[in-house]
């Protein structure tokens, strides 16, 4: 019984430590741009495009992005990029122009296709 209690304590501690990590960011390990879903929409794909590079990821078949989840991109290009979000049916649920600099940028999808941008982790608010 003591062993089970010890294992449970270790798992709880690991979960608490992990919640301080990047809230389970999928995608790139050390992203420049993180898309965070704080809406009821389920994201099936995300694209990031600028003048010199374009990236997209289809999440529909593997792991769609639900509320509380995020996906990170490594972006070589500094300056303005477009972030576009689509649901599982291919409908655009958000589009936002974002200026990338030296700091990591977080783009948050909120209800009613509202998107906010900042440099603080949105899941800590």
Image (cartoon, grey):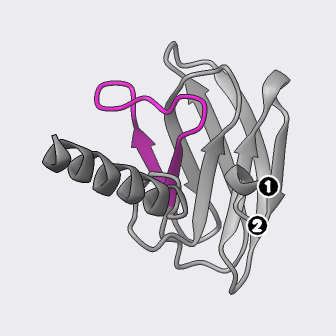
Percent across and percent down for residue 104 are 65, 74
Which stretch is magenta?
A: 54-72
13 vs 78: above or below: above
Q: Nearer the viewer, mark 1 or mark 2?
A: 2
- Secondary structure under the numbered disc 2 in the rendered image: loop
- For disc 2, the marked residue is 120
At horizontal 45% and vertical 74% (from top left) the residue drawn is 30
Is residue 7 one of those drawn in magenta? no
Q: Could you say which disc has been placed on residue 45 in the image?
A: none
Question: In the image shown, does 85 or 25 lie closer to the viewer?
Answer: 25
- Secondary structure under the numbered disc 1 in the rendered image: strand
Locate the N terminus by quadrant: top left
Percent across and percent down for residue 11 are 31, 51
At horizontal 35% and vertical 32% (from top left) the residue drawn is 63
67 vs 26: above or below: above
- For disc 1, the marked residue is 97
Is residue 61 one of those drawn in magenta? yes
């Amino acid at each position: 019984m003591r062993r089970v209690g010890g294992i449970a304590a270790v798992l709880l501690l690991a979960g608490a430590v992990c919640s301080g990590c990047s809230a389970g960011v999928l995608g790139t390990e050390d992203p420049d741009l993180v898309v965070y879903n704080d809406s009821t929409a389920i994201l099936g794909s995300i694209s990031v495009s600028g003048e010199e590079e374009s990236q997209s990821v289809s999440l529909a078949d593997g792991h769609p992005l639900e509320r509380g989840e995020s996906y990170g991109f490594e972006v070589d290009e500094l300056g303005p990029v477009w972030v576009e979000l689509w649901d599982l049916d291919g409908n655009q649920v958000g589009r936002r122009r974002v200026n990338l600099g030296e700091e990591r940028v977080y783009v948050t999808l909120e209800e009613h296709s509202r998107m906010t941008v900042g440099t603080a982790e949105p899941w800590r608010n």
